[in-house]
Image: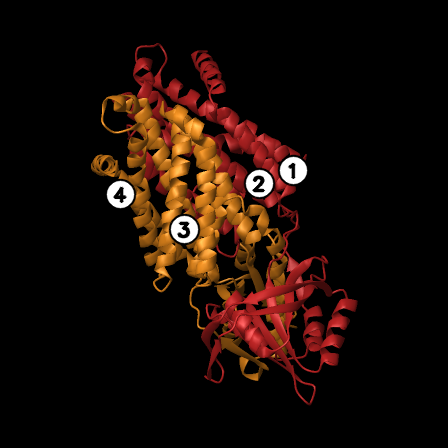
Chain colours: A red, B orange
């Protein structure tokens, strides 16, 4: 009862301040950005510069063939300004080094071809056709993009020269080499014979939906860690914690109500983002359970850290380093092939993956296991914070 | 005036040494720089991960290792368990009737993973080798991948925010302790005091940025350009700090303000990286966009003085514009 009364009082105070409203405004801004600025399917920004070293009729024929097969479409021509520049290029096969020195500024108009994904029909890369090899090399160097000369000899055989930046991995270079062993027809025929077996059928989040777990985890639960610290330092400076010592309320109920305020805010802001975008798709029961336990554990961590310092500025370093460390699993979330083992021990890793499973209504076993882990972990952190606050009653 | 500012800065520096505050601000970008240095090789290696049998033909394994990260397993159960884990990995294992190989996927991978694995198996079955290729590679000898430049530029943007955050919290705490009112009976003006306090965050941040750029190995960039952008970015930190610090009544409001400022920073980075060229103009309102654009071009060594001066000018003008617009609020905050 006392807990409820303290919570009501805290919420009344929170409603008077700006924080609660800023959270709601932020959630609305994020929702608007996701709905109107983020497309459901990502738009490729991949660029390639190409010089066809062959008779015009042949390159036109190849282009028209691709267009008729639906693999290519003509885009708007672009103008490109090139500054004076000097550099060297090393042919990795012959060891020959060529020095280039362009002393004049140059403006080129390039024909644009847009390569399309045969499965989805969406843009997969944009290719710009350059009229001579010198311009191609200059553009590839200046624009830091890949360039390729496609050459046809008298026997109508094709060969390729790729202009690379130098930081590409050896594996990628090896792949470029073997791409040009056989004719495209032979490769296509063999590719069609490959057997692909999938172990399960999964739904996937689209580009827009895929951003939601990150927004919830980083703008919600993780900020709870930061905001609860701000609450505590505010109360410390006002002597509220010391005042609690002479009231019938216990320190733990005071700390818990702070977490409840954060939880209320996070529940509202998350709902504002998730419901309009995901509709009835996610498992909402698990979403709120997971949200509550993760926010509780993060806020408990914030409480524990706050118990060691007198002010926000003094805790700043620890808080900042921790927040940065907790952001790291975002790399693995967005680049699934980058998944080092040690990164899985960061709490935000299962938070992101768990949210993804919930939105997909997928592996609820994973979500339940980590809900239990966060609950137990949060409880231990809360106990430690409570012990520390009770011992010191620091203000 | 300058002497008084310097006295406040010196006093603040001495105080902050006791809290290790200055050390924290300087160390934070350095820790991040070390992380970037450790992470960027792994992030840059964008080839596919493959699971194969240990008992598979050694030549087959060696072939695949030329193009992919290969993990080896004893049995089909182990392979399937590995494929079912959360990261993207494809398995290439023999078909039951020994008629070739099959690609095993979890089912939720990006299409590119499937295509890559299928392509590699196709080339293996065709007997394609590097030696028989009709391709040649020419390299410009650059060694820093664009992803690394991007991460370091993001780090610089975060450091600008960090300085602003620190200035704002520091001002709020001074307001809370009534130091600003107490200044009325000292020879230094309130504005001078706030500027002096902000100098610490800005100067130490500049040092942090320089250290971070050095740690990540960007030695041969144009240092005049990066320092110019560093000094211009200090203005940004000032404005973030002033607006949040003087506009907030308590540390809670300052903390919420920090969250608000993350939006234009993240938005500017996303805008520069993901918007098509023809839509870049939609980000011109943001000083963070100009700072990010100039810094990433300097680090990738594609910047010229015209672009850097334009970016520095835009950051200055936009920041001053915000300052002038918010001046009444700042005055109110100081009173």
Quadrant in which residue A139 is drawn = bottom right
Give me the C-alpha separation between circle 4 and circle 1: 44 Å
Indicate which disc residue B23 carries.
4
The answer to whether dots 3 and 1 both sit on one chain is yes
Does A315 sit left or right of B256 as displayed? left
Closest to the camera, between mark 4 and mark 1, is 4
Give me the C-alpha separation between circle 3 and circle 4: 27 Å
Give me the C-alpha separation between circle 2 and circle 4: 35 Å
Closest to the camera, between mark 3 and mark 2, is 2
The answer to whether dots 4 and 1 both sit on one chain is no
Tags 2 and 4 touching, CB below 8 Å: no
Chain letter of mark 4 equals B
Task: Please give the name of the residue rendered at 46% of the width and 31% of the height, measured from the top-left corner.
Answer: B326
Tags 2 and 1 touching, CB below 8 Å: yes
Does A125 sit left or right of B25 as displayed? right
Chain letter of mark 1 equals A
Residue position marked by numbered label 1 in the rendering: A278
Indicate which disc residue A342 carries.
3
Does A37 sit left or right of B45 as displayed? right
Tags 4 and 1 touching, CB below 8 Å: no
Closest to the camera, between mark 3 and mark 1, is 1
């Amino acid at each position: 009862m006392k807990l409820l009364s303290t919570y009501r009082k805290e919420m009344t105070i929170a409603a008077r301040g700006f924080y609660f409203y800023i959270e709601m405004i932020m959630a609305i801004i994020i929702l608007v950005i996701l709905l109107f600025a983020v497309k459901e399917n990502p738009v490729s920004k991949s660029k390639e510069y190409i010089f066809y070293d062959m008779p015009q009729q042949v390159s036109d024929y190849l282009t028209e063939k691709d267009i008729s097969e639906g693999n290519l479409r003509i885009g708007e021509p672009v103008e490109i300004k090139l500054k004076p520049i000097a550099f060297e290029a090393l042919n990795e096969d012959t060891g020959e080094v060529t020095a280039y020195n362009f002393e004049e500024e140059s403006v080129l108009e390039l024909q644009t071809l847009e390569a399309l994904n045969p499965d989805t029909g969406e843009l997969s890369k944009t290719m710009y056709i350059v009229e001579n090899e010198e311009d191609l090399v200059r553009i590839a160097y200046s624009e830091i993009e890949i360039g390729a000369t496609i050459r046809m000899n008298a026997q109508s055989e094709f060969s390729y020269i790729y202009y690379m930046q130098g930081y590409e991995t050896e594996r990628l270079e090896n792949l470029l080499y073997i791409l040009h062993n056989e004719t495209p027809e032979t490769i296509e025929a063999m590719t069609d014979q490959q057997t692909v077996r999938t172990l399960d059928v999964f739904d996937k989040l689209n580009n827009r939906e895929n951003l939601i777990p990150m927004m919830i985890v980083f703008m919600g639960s993780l900020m709870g860690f930061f905001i609860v610290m701000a609450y505590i330092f505010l109360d410390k400076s006002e002597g509220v914690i010391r005042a609690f010592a002479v009231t019938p309320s216990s320190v733990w109920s005071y700390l818990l109500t702070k977490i409840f305020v954060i939880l209320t805010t996070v529940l509202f802001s998350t709902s504002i983002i998730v419901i309009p975008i995901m509709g009835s798709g996610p498992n909402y029961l698990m979403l709120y359970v997971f949200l509550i336990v993760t926010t509780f554990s993060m806020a408990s961590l914030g409480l524990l850290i706050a118990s060691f310092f007198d002010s926000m500025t003094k805790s700043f370093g620890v808080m900042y380093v921790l927040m940065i460390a907790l952001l790291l699993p975002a790399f693995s979330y967005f680049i699934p092939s980058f998944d080092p083992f040690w990164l899985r021990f960061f709490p935000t890793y299962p938070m992101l993956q768990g949210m993804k499973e919930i939105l997909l209504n997928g592996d609820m076993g994973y979500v339940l296991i980590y809900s239990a882990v966060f609950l137990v972990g949060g409880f231990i952190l809360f106990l430690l914070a409570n012990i520390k606050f009770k011992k010191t009653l620091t203000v | 005036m300058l002497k008084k500012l310097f006295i406040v800065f010196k006093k603040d520096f001495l105080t902050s040494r006791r809290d290790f505050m200055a050390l924290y601000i300087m160390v934070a970008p350095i820790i991040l720089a070390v992380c970037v240095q450790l992470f960027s090789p792994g992030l840059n290696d964008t080839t596919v991960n493959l699971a194969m049998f240990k008992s598979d033909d050694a030549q087959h394994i060696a072939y695949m290792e030329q193009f992919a990260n290969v993990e080896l397993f004893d049995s089909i159960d182990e392979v399937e368990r590995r494929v079912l884990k959360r990261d993207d990995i494809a398995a290439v294992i023999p078909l039951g009737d020994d008629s070739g190989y099959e690609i095993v996927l979890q089912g939720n991978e990006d299409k590119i993973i499937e295509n890559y694995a299928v392509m590699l198996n196709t080339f293996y079955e065709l007997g394609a080798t590097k030696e028989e290729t009709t391709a040649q590679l020419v390299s410009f000898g650059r060694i820093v991948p664009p992803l690394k430049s991007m991460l370091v530029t993001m780090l610089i943007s975060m450091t600008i925010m960090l300085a602003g955050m620190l200035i704002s919290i520091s001002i709020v705490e001074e307001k809370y302790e009534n130091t600003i009112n107490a200044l009325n009976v000292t020879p230094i003006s309130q504005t001078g005091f706030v500027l002096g306090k902000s100098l610490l965050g800005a100067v130490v941040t500049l040092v942090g940025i320089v250290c971070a750029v050095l740690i990540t190995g960007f030695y041969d960039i144009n240092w005049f350009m990066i320092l110019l952008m560093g000094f211009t970015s200090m203005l940004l930190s000032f404005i973030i700090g002033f607006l949040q610090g003087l506009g907030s009544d308590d540390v809670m409001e300052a903390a919420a303000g920090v969250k608000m400022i993350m939006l234009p920073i993240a938005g500017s980075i996303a805008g520069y990286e993901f918007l098509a060229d023809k839509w870049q103009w939609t980000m011109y309102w943001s000083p963070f966009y100009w700072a990010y654009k100039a810094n990433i071009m300097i680090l990738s060594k594609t910047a010229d003085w015209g672009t850097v001066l334009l970016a520095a000018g835009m950051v200055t003008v936009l920041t001053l514009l915000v300052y002038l617009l918010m001046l009444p609020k700042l005055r109110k905050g100081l009173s």
